[in-house]
């Protein structure tokens, strides 16, 4: 069986690494050729230097999900996918992320190996190199502890692109002046040029959490697996609350990666049921609560420009529905596995036979998922008619050299008006 199409993680990693956009062999991962699709087609526009250009992808689920084995019914509180209130900690999440990103000069080797993690996540659980991953995870024990603390913070703080502050300047006779001491602390100010590197670091962190979950699934330790799934889901949800659209979209891709590990879980023989933990997840799972609606952000002191395409807010509902649909499909499979576990391994012939739990509907169609048996295999179908294709989000970082000199001249003259 092919994995649910959460190759968003792979697409995201490729984009961040700056590899060329090439047509993907996976029909669910579409790429955009920068030579044929320009964000700014104005022939009179000033020549801008392209600093970075990337595409982030959120694929939709595969049309067919196959039920593997009955579940092992367990109490709902054992394998949780959310944190309890008493597990939350005080502090700002960004402080812990900064410690995670920092490199220890005495032990520079203690950093996540993105290539190794990506390689292992491309394998089935039984194919993973357990010995190599064990050594790597032991070396990164302090790093993963920092990630756990970051996602459990009550105060979710992210850096953001901060425009120059304006303040009254009555002494100089001007209406506004440049505020050289912005109200946002320096460690929370995000430069546009820093976005690709930050995305790469956060993607590595998400891969580390996903690899931890799959590692423990492969070893059959579902207590540890649920611990890291819980952390991975929390990390993705934190990122979707970012004010900057590229980071919020990357958070949705990280949530997709975490749900992919849940699909690995349900495919394992005699894997515990996750129906109730999936029911306890917040709805919707993705909440873009802080993203600004602008498609172009200019940074005054460097003349860097961040452009995004398409309009993020108009596509946000579709992204939210896509992730919700995948969660509902996984929960529907878990309902079937749980039914089989409670009925001597016999799967239901139709979803209406499941009476022990409430079977979720397809959030896109508001109808029941299609469920049938083919050649002795029970299959849950997702209607292809409502699969609107690849959800893509593209961002570009530009710089106008002439604008840099002009703005530096303005900055060199305190009290100049800014309208």
Image (cartoon, rainbow, N blue to C red):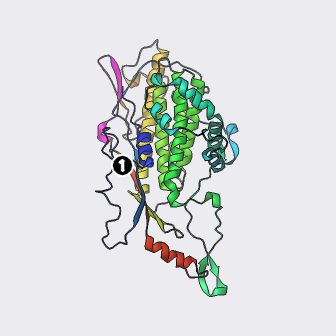
Residue that appears at 43% across and 23% down: 336
Image coords of residue 189 (percent x, y): 59, 60
> Is residue 80 among the parts visible in the rendering?
no
Image coords of residue 371 (percent x, y): 35, 26
Q: Residues within 10 Å of mark 1 (few under 14, many from 20)?
A: few
Residue that appears at 57% across and 40% down: 234
Tell which of 48 and 255 is nearer to you.
48
Instruction: List the single residue furthest toward the bottom.
Output: 173
Examine the image and state in which quarter residue 219 appears.
Answer: top right
Number of numbered discs on residues: 1
**In the rendered view, would you say 261 is above or below 375?**
below
Is 282 left, or right, of 372 in this rendering? right
Image coords of residue 110 (percent x, y): 61, 38
Residue that appears at 35% across and 45% down: 390
Instruction: List the single residue furthest toward the front.
Output: 106
Image coords of residue 89 (percent x, y): 70, 42
Residue that appears at 40% across and 25% down: 352
Q: Is residue 381 magenta?
A: yes
Q: Which residues are magenta?
A: 375-386
Residue named by callout 1: 20
**In the rendered view, would you say 378 is above or below 294?**
above
């Amino acid at each position: 069986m092919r994995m649910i199409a959460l190759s968003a993680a792979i697409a995201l990693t490729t984009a961040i690494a700056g590899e060329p956009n090439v047509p993907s062999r996976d029909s669910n991962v579409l790429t955009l050729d920068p030579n044929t699709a320009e964000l700014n087609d104005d022939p009179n526009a000033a020549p801008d230097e392209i600093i970075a250009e990337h595409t982030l992808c959120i694929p939709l689920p595969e049309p067919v999900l196959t039920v593997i084995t009955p579940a092992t019914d367990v109490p709902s509180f054992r394998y949780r996918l959310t944190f309890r209130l008493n597990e939350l900690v005080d502090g700002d999440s960004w402080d812990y992320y900064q410690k995670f990103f920092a490199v220890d000069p005495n032990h520079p080797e203690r950093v996540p190996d993105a290539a190794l993690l990506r390689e292992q996540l491309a394998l089935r659980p039984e194919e993973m190199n357990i010995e190599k991953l064990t050594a790597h995870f032991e070396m990164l024990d302090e790093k993963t502890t920092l990630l756990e603390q970051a996602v459990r913070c009550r105060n979710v703080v992210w850096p953001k692109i901060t425009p120059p502050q304006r303040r009254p300047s009555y002494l100089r006779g001007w209406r506004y002046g440049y505020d050289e001491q912005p109200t946002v602390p320096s460690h929370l100010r995000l430069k546009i040029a820093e976005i690709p590197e930050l995305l790469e670091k956060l993607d590595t962190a998400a891969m580390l959490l996903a690899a931890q979950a799959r590692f423990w699934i492969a070893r059959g330790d579902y207590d540890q697996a649920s611990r890291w799934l819980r952390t991975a889901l929390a990390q993705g949800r934190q990122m979707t609350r970012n004010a900057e659209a590229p980071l919020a979209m990357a958070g949705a891709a990280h949530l997709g990666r975490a749900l992919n590990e849940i699909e690995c879980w349900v495919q394992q023989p005699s894997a515990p049921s996750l129906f109730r933990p999936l029911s306890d997840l917040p709805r919707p799972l993705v909440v873009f609560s802080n993203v600004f609606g602008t498609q172009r952000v200019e940074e005054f002191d460097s003349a860097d420009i961040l452009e995004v395409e398409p309009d993020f807010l108009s596509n946000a509902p579709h992204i939210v529905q896509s992730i919700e649909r995948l969660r509902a499909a996984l929960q529907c499979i878990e309902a079937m596995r749980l039914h089989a576990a409670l009925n001597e391994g016999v799967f239901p012939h139709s979803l209406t036979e499941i009476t022990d739990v409430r079977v979720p509907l397809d959030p896109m169609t508001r109808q029941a998922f299609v469920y049938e048996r083919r050649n002795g295999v029970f299959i849950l179908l997702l209607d292809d008619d409502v699969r609107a294709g690849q959800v893509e989000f593209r961002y570009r970082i530009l710089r106008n050299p002439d604008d840099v000199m002009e703005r530096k001249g303005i900055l060199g003259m305190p009290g100049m008006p800014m309208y």
